[in-house]
Amino acid sequence: MSAPEAIASGVRLARVELEVREWIAFDEPSLRRYASGAGIELAAPQRLHVAADCVTLSIRPARWLLLRAGGTTGAADSPVPSAVGACVELSSSLAAFLLSGPGAREVLARGCRLDLDTRVFPAGSAAATLMAQVAVTLGALAGGFLLLTPASTARHFEEWLTATARPFGVRAAGTLTFQELSGDRSL
Amino acid sequence: MPGPRRIGGGLLTSGGEPVNFRFDGRAFQGLAGDTLASALLACGVRVLGRSFKYHRPRGALTCGPEEPCALVDVISGDAREPNRPATTLALHEGLVAESQNRRPSLRFDLLAVNDLLGRFLPAGFYYKTFMSPAWAWERLYEPLIRRAAGLGRLAARVDEHGTPAETVHDHCDVLVVGAGAAGLSAAARLGAGGLRVLLAEADTVLGGGTLLSERWDPWREERVASLAGFATLRVLPRTTVLGAYGHGVYGLLERLAEPQRERFGGLTERLRIVRTRRVLLATGALERPVAFPGNDRPGVMLAGAALAYLRRYGVAVGERPAFFVNSDEAYESAFALHAAGVRCAALVDVRRTSPAAERARALGIPVHAGCVIARVFGRGGVRAVTVAARDGGRHVRVAADALLVSGGFTPVTALATQLGARLAWRGAIAAFVSELTGAAGATAGAARGVFGLAAAAGDGARAAALVAAQLGVTLPPDVSPAPPQDAAQGPLEALWEVPGRGKAFVDLQNDVTADDVRLARREGYEHLEHMKRYTTHGMATDQGKSGGLLGAAVLAAARDVPIEEVGQLRPRPYYEPVPFAALAGPEVRGHYRPKRRLPLHEWHESAGATFINAGLWLRPLVYGGAGWEPVLAEARAVRVGVGLTDVSSLGKIDVQGRGAAAFLDFVYANTFSTLPVGRARYGIMLREDGMLFDDGTTSRLAPEHFLITTTTANAAAVLEHLEFHREAHARHLEVAFTDVGDQWAQFALAGPRSREVASAVVTEPDLSNGAFPFMAAAAATIAGVSGRLFRISFSGELAYELAVPARQARSVWAALLAAGESCGLRPYGLDALNTLRIEKGHVTAAELNGNTSARDLGFERMLKKDGDFIGRALSERPALLGPGRLQLVGVRPVDRTRRLRNGMQLVVRAAPTTSLGYVTSCTPSVQLEGWVGLALLADGRSRLGTRVLGSSLIHGELEELEIVSPHFIDPENQRVRS
């Protein structure tokens, strides 16, 4: 009598160990040139750019989060010339999760007001929003969603995410490496 | 098949397994697919509840969510959910339901005496009757009325362990509301156009009016099946659109089917918040009753409802029903029951003639044309009716066990009017219609007065094309099968009321009669909304669904004006009752608000800390037991030795850029551009209105790099303040702020022996007083970790604050504990910190409470003389400079054995009821004898050395206090510089 109701199942939740820097541009063209010279591509506004050794996210004008493998150093660490911008260390400030699987959007729809449909928020999109009343920076990867939340609210957020994902058959996937995040497009 | 009135297999119950349930303690059996109402009707139960005011026996009037009478309590263990319509309550094995509003039983209700006293209890009677004595209203009358009134009752106990509800956010291009002929047709067309469609249907099944006609089965099944082929279309059955909230936001309540309930841990309802670009309202029309004496008796039902019970559940609501109609549409029920073998006692049509009447006569159904029902016999259920000619001629008594009524159909306009659509009267259907215009979307089918299923289906397709065009999408050619043709219909004749003796109800849920409406008009409540409030017409869960238009029509007749002048009630959200749990969503109990945890939260837990909420943070209050003793022991350790506390929750804001110093000069009342690199300075920030906003230390880490610390509670507000003023007033300055509160764990090491401990873990810089003096700030290596070191003190003792990346917090904390072991280092919590800062006279949120100025707290020398800063102009307004301001002072009980209390009012003996101020913070002192406190006192500084009284009326305490300097210890600041 009714069209079948299908709610996607299957969700994988993992923590990701990352080093995080925030780059702030006082002179954006110069900062982009500086980044380019350092081998870093700064993402376009509201976008996420994945490279082999560095993921960049843009969620506010003239600001980028630069993510790379935990415990490593790289070009993102080098001090930005003060004439073009500033760099702030945020590795301890943010906790990172990856939510993947067919049910990931359904899980996030239980807390996220943004439209995460692939046509509206395709892989490569990024946004800052609220979920479970906490600040979340959200990035769509090819195989899942990268979720960054302040370290002090990480436990609250993880508890909410786990409880919300339970009906979708959530599977805890431990801690992912940066290479799994940036390299495996089928996550 | 269970139940003597079940005469065939219904669409929903055919092949259904028997289901056992209990109603009012009696065991019954129904079928899977039944509702409680259909199962009880099948079993011959006609009385399902008692009415709100008169406690008259009532049956089901409808077969859907608009049911005004058959509301029940659903009982599950200790939980009791009231006001569930039996007409939509899905039957399941073991269901337990109870009727409402009866004492002691449904069969015998003591308060049915209200019905006999009805002439003394008209609308608004209690406003007039219970006027005196005045004292009796609150103590006697209101409690009695409240006990007597009401329908269901809530469980006394709240289920603490139930599954929290869900809130789901959905997005679509078009929200189609209603899956009848128009909605199905529209949704399929929009889906074919590739639009993202959400089709919400309150019923458990799709089809709406098409479910009531076998002829429509093939079309409906094809359309429903076609929906599954559209990848961008989602169907939400059992989902009611509760309200329209503007900007494309709609609230929906989804009732979960059994398999989903299990999957979601017992969840029964889910709130959906939909954001859509357009809405397509295909909400249909509801059949309405007619007001005539006895129109509420059990067995009086809407004709369409009787057809629905037959088609959906195979239940004949009567063995010998009579009909009372004014349109051809209503004959469908009679034809269907006749075809099912039910003998119709009479078909009373207010019209002289119609094509349907001729067809009925041909079938052998006795038609009484040009007649009305004048009376209904049978208090507990219809036994007979009196048929009267409209011209006042003959009266005939006809034996009947049900009376199936149709006064016409009223388009459902609730959502449209919430979206601002205007109502327009359509005489042909005797109803108001509304049509969405502009960017909101479109209305289709019966909701805009297009009656007839085929016409509605066609109108749905029209509306779909219109909405698609608004969204810039051209729909592909329609290749769907043609629907069955609508039969030719005779015109409807409006009939609202049949005058006569006895109560004729316009609102069955709220027991409002046509006489009540006329009384309201006589009393001066002529406007529909005033009449509503005087009589309660259209209130409660009904919201005018069944009798809203009927009441308006009776009011129009009483005022002798066309109904267009009266209008129709415009229901607000919610369209139907919503459980509070569904509105609360998942953010309840432990999840009511987020918790922020310190990097060392687990360590503090394992050390036996008692936590306190400081904003969203959980901070250690004290380690050890209750009472003051452990607090004072911790504070004493700081005064005489060394203590360590976790201050990671302090707000920290990284400020960088060539304009950083100039900007800080602008947002702080004191100057920072002169601060040398490697130094920290205490600063105060004012609001625009000149009042104190926040305080904290700011350190200069590099010429263009500062670190601001804020109070724990104000961190987010300060960042917002900075961002705002940067954008609003200082765009020319090159400055950027970043919240680094979570990045840095920060520990305060305080006490005369703190240098010993710090020196053991800090390898650089040199901590000697000369090399690293009070208010120094530097990069440091702390237990091998790169961090920052500050020589600042909140306790009044020699102290260091050590900051390290939060990931390294555990190892550094452990190193500090180990290094301090030989010095007797003791961790201390927020209570001890508070004791220490009160003794030192440092202010916190209790004094920086939004009502104090810099001068009030003794900071006037910090206000810079030159240059502008936020709040400067208004900080110099006369009200903040004149006498009488509450100023910060210290207070001590004259009798050192007596205690202080926060909030104690300060008075003088000559005027004991005139408050001169109050105690803001107090503590037993570890340095002095007895209690010490900070207070805000009118002209406090001029009262130093005098005495006042501290009054705590709550505790019945009145203490003599001496007014002293707020700096109880080390006023010369020797210790912090040692």
Image (spheres, helix red, strand yellow):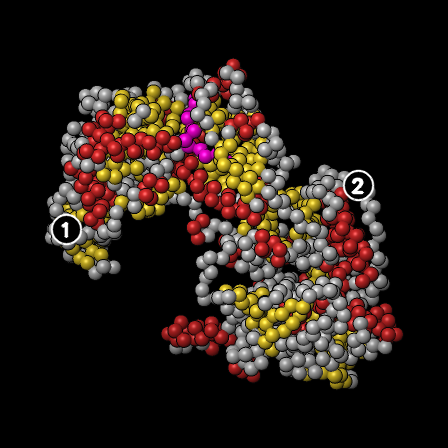
Quarter of the image where the C terminus of chain B is located: top left
**Residue B652 versus residue B475 in the image, above or below:** above
Task: Report in which chain the residue with disc 1 lies.
Answer: B
Task: Report in which chain the residue with disc 2 lies.
Answer: B
What residue appears at the point 56 percent right and 75 percent down from the top-left corner?
B25
Crowd rating for badge 2 (residues with CA inside 10 Å; few <14, some 14–19, many 20+): few
What residue appears at the point 25 percent right and 50 percent down from the top-left corner?
B625
Q: Is residue B112 inside the magenta stretch? A: no
**Residue B212 versus residue B649 in the image, above or below:** below
The residue indicated by pointer 2 is B476
State the residue in front, B926 or B451. Answer: B926
- Residue projecting furthest to the right: B362
Where is residue B378 shown, x and y percent of the image? 66, 83
Where is residue B939 shown, x and y percent of the image? 20, 44
- Helix, strand, or loop for circle 1? strand
What residue appears at the point 18 percent right and 41 percent down from the top-left corner?
B636
Q: Given the image, on which type of amino acid does mark 2 rest? A: Pro
Which image quarter: residue A79? top left
Residue range in magenta is A86-97
**CA gap, disc 2 to disc 1?**
87 Å
Q: Which mark is residue B893?
A: 1
Confirm whether residue B444 shows in the render: no
Decide if residue B685 is on the left or right side of residue B933: right
